[in-house]
Structure formats: C-alpha cells, structure tokens
C-alpha cells in the first residue's frame, strides 16, 4: 500500500485496499456517465446569479414546452438543498419500497411519454427533511443523477441548478463538458449585478452561454391590460448587448404562473395564448433555433 493510503481503513491482505476499490468504482461510474451523456444530444443548464428570479419556473416550463413539441426531454433537479421540481409537476412517486430490488440503472420519474424527471425528493422518504450535505456528497449525487439513471435517448436534458456559482453548477460544468447555460434574471440592477457573475463563471469554466432570459419583465394588469414595470424592464437585453450574448426573450409576470406552480400544472408552457405564454413561446423558439433537433418520424 502506498504512503498516501496508509490512513485508509483497508485490510493488509487487500493489495488495492479501500482506495483501489473506490478508484475502480469511480472508473466504472465514469464509463456510465459517458455512456449516458453520449445518448443526449443537448444539455441545458438553467442558472441564475441570485435566488428569487423564477429560475426553476423557467427550467420546468422549458422542459415541458420542449416535450409538448414532441421532443424527448429529461429534467434534472440539482438544486439539492431546495428541490422544487417534483412539486411544480405534482410528482409524488417514490423510488423504492422495502421489498423492491434495486435495478442496475434507476428509472427516472415519468411525467408523460416525452418527459422524464429526476430530483432528490424522488429518493427521500420524507420530502420535508433538510439536506445537510457538503461538497463531496453533492458532487457524488450529481454524478449518480447522470450515470446511474436510465435516461435512454434524449433530445434535451434540462438541468435546474441552485442560484449562484457553487458546487452544483461547477460539478455540472466539470461532468458535462458540452453543456449550454441558459441564464435567468429579472430586470432590476441588483439581479443584473449577479448575472454578470454568472457570465464570468461560465467563461471561466468554459461553458457555452446559450443566452439570457429576462423573467418577471413587467406585469400585465388584469383590469386594464396595460403593462406595469414593477421591477423595470430591458435589463436582461442590456446585459446581453454588453457581453455580446443572445437575448432569448422576456417574460412578464402573471398570477397564473404562481397558481400553476403550486398546483403542479406549469402555466408558461400551457399554450393558453396570454401575453406571458406567447412571450415564453418566443423563448422556446429561440432555444430550439440555437439547438436544433430533427424529430424522428
């Protein structure tokens, strides 16, 4: 055993020791990761510089919207401390009962024929239990979400990350080399300041930026149908021009978005024909135009 491994609780009659076993396991998982990722055409990391900008709402509706258009889509929730995707889609499945035998690859939750979902809540007995994890556990969970899940062939994998530039988005960047970042912001300057940090992060770790979405861009009054710029407007486009990035579109506030998220029926991708849903359709069209997939007949 090497000097570096003397502190490992490995047995003297094991030539590799615990470290060797761990290396073999990691190597096998690496193979699984590459096999999974090779079957997914495009990977989209939905991120934001700060919380409260509607990032999970955008991620959920992007995945739902792509699935409604006939694409095969996966939605992966790596916001490990605050996973909301299951609740936003009203998914209440549990992975195993005590009598179940663990399969080689774990099945994701199936929302419909075109949309598969994985979230930490899927693996928890008590969904209200706090996740008190440090970096290594979070990194391993994300690796398992990719390599140990039976995603099959996907046109798009949409990844909902927590706000900021911490372990989760960094892990995604290191594991998925060809991931595209979709950055969500609101129009006010305090949000835009954090978006600049997200842009800097992407450029530092080599993530291609798909574009910027300005969420909560004004509010359409339900009484007079006139726009009210609660948080201002145009900030997302301003930052896009400042950094020579693509502006994917702006989506106004609509009370039905909140109601849809709470009821498990995402609203922006519902095709309701309102100002908000039409604006979101333009965002989807821009995503598809930049990351085109030829649908199989």
Image (cartoon, rainbow, N blue to C red):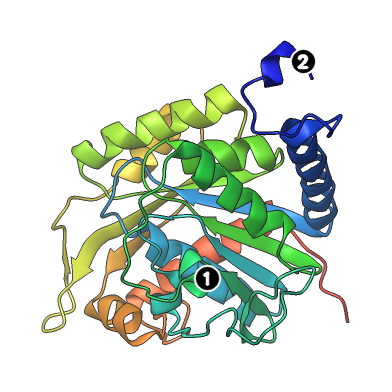
Q: How crowded is mark 2: few (under 14 residues within 10 Å), some or many (20 or more)?
A: few
User: Quarter of the image containing the C terminus?
Assistant: bottom right
Specify whether residue 291 is in view.
no
| Residue 17 image position (x, y, % from top left) | 77, 32
The residue under label 2 is 2
| Residue 97 image position (x, y, % from top left) | 58, 85
- Answer left or right for 206 relative to 122: right
Label annotation for residue 52: none
Relative to 83, is 214 above or below? above
Q: Residue at x 79, y 20 (%)?
A: 1
Who is closer to the viewer here, 273 or 128?
128
Q: What element carries label 1?
A: helix
Asked where in the image residue 102 lies, by quadrant, the reply is bottom right
Query: How far separated are the C-alphas under marks 2 and 1?
Result: 37 Å
Relative to 273, is 192 above or below? above
Specify whether residue 84 is in view.
yes
Q: Residue at x 61, y 22 (%)?
A: 7
The residue under label 1 is 123
Name the front one of labels 2 and 1.
2
| Residue 162 image position (x, y, % from top left) | 40, 50
Relative to 232, is 150 above or below? below
| Residue 33 image position (x, y, % from top left) | 77, 50
């Amino acid at each position: 055993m090497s000097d570096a491994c003397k502190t490992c609780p490995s047995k003297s009659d094991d030539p590799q020791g615990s470290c060797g076993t761990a290396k073999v396991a990691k190597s096998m998982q690496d193979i699984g990761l590459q096999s999974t990722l090779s079957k997914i055409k495009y990977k989209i990391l939905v991120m934001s510089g700060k919380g409260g900008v509607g990032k999970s709402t955008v991620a959920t509706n992007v995945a739902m919207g792509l699935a409604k258009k006939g694409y095969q889509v996966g939605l992966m929730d790596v916001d490990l401390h605050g996973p909301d995707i299951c609740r936003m889609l009203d998914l209440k499945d549990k992975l195993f009962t005590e009598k179940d035998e663990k399969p080689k690859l774990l099945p994701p939750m199936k929302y419909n024929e075109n949309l598969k979902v994985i979230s930490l809540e899927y693996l928890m007995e008590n969904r209200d239990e706090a996740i008190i994890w440090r970096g290594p556990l979070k990194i391993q969970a994300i690796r398992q979400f990719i390599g140990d899940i039976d995603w099959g062939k996907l046109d798009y994998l949409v990844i909902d990350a927590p706000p900021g530039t911490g372990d989760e988005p960094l892990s995604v960047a290191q594991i998925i080399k060809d991931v595209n970042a979709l950055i969500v912001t609101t129009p006010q300057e305090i949000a835009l300041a954090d978006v600049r940090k997200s842009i800097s992060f992407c450029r530092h770790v080599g993530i291609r930026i798909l574009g910027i979405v300005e969420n909560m861009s004004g509010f359409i009054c339900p009484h007079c149908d006139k726009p009210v710029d609660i948080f201002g407007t145009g900030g997302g486009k301003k930052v896009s021009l400042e950094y020579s990035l693509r502006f994917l579109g702006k989506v106004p506030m609509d009370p039905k978005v909140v109601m849809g998220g709470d009821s498990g029926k995402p609203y922006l991708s519902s095709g309701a024909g309102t100002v908000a849903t039409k604006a979101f359709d333009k965002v989807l069209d821009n995503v598809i135009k930049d990351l085109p997939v030829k649908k199989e007949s």
